[in-house]
Image: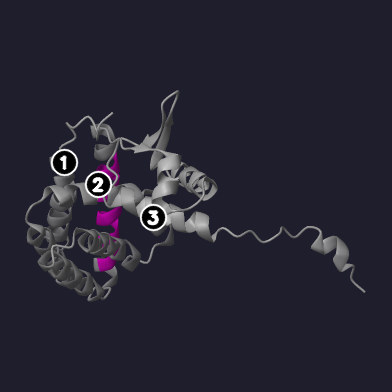
Amino acid sequence: MKDTKSDSAKISKIENVTLRTEVADVLRNAIINGLFKPGTPIVEMALAEQLDVSRAPVREAIQLLENEGLIETLAYKGKRVKPLARKDVDELYSLREVLELFAARRIIEAGTDVSELRLHCDAMVEAANAQDLVALNAADEAFHRAIIRLSNHDLLLSQWNNVYLRVRQVMALRNSANRDLGAVARNHPPIVDALEGRDLARVTELLSQHVRSAADLDLSSTEWSQ
């Protein structure tokens, strides 16, 4: 008979991480949706009071977000939302352009059905009409994630997952600075048209133009830049 005692001794106990996860989700969404802008101080006690929880799950959640690169620690000054430097944005979006163009090429070569992208376009229009910036940001990121996913390339999707939080953060900051949310929504259907038409040259032009528009993000504010 198998000795289960020695096996059970190797099994880690179950941890209740629900509250920590919930707090991390709240803080993460506040950062990537632009509510907590780059440079915003992260004060553990104040957040615990605001969220009506103890400081322990807040501390653990902050550590999770620091591991994700959204929060940083300054010696003798505490923690803050990691600022954005122009170099950060340029590197992030130049990489994003490479990822999305590679995905688009694979989609066209494989003749992949991209009708799903229309749903995300519709969601952006609905959010823009309602002036719902959070919903618009979510639909915007979902559109570009779908392009990556429809390329059917697992490693590519993994690379997107490594950067999407910062991509979403920059998206939110750009979109919040755009008074015409309808314009954000209208930028996307032509990309779908080009993909459906298997027009690689047109897709390349549109995606490159769309991604490179991140250069318009104003980082002059001391709250945003390093």
Q: How many labels, in total?
A: 3
Q: Are marks 1 and 2 in contact (CB under 8 Å)?
A: yes
Q: Earlier in the sequence, mark 1 or mark 2?
A: 2
Say whether residue 198 is visible: no
Near mark 1 (Cα within 10 A), the count class, few <14, some 14-19 or many ≥20, is some
- Quadrant where the N terminus is found in the figure: bottom right
Q: Earlier in the sequence, mark 2 or mark 3?
A: 3
In the image shown, does 128 or 150 lie closer to the viewer? 128
Can you give x and y, in whole percent of width and height, for residue 211 in the image? 19, 50
**Residue 105 in magenta?**
yes
Say whether residue 39 is visible: yes
Q: Which residue position holds label 2?
A: 170
The secondary structure that most of the magenta stretch takes on is helix
Near mark 2 (Cα within 10 A), the count class, few <14, some 14-19 or many ≥20, is many
Amino acid type indicated by mark 3: Val
The stretch in magenta equals: 91-107
Q: CA distance from mark 2 to mark 3?
A: 18 Å
Left or right: residue 124 versus residue 51 is left
Q: Are marks 2 and 3 in contact (CB under 8 Å)?
A: no
Q: Could you tell me which secondary element the residue under label 1 belongs to?
A: loop
Q: Is residue 44 above or below residue 24?
A: above
Can you give x and y, in whole percent of width and height, for residue 166 in the image? 32, 47
Left or right: residue 42 versus residue 39 is right
Q: Quadrant of residue 153?
A: bottom left
Q: Which residue position holds label 1?
A: 217
In the image shown, does 122 or 80 lie closer to the viewer? 80
Q: Which residue position holds label 3?
A: 26
Amino acid type indicated by mark 2: Val
Task: Looking at this view, name the residue that lies furthest to the top.
Answer: 76
Q: Is residue 12 above or below residue 72?
A: below
Q: Are marks 3 and 1 in contact (CB under 8 Å)?
A: no
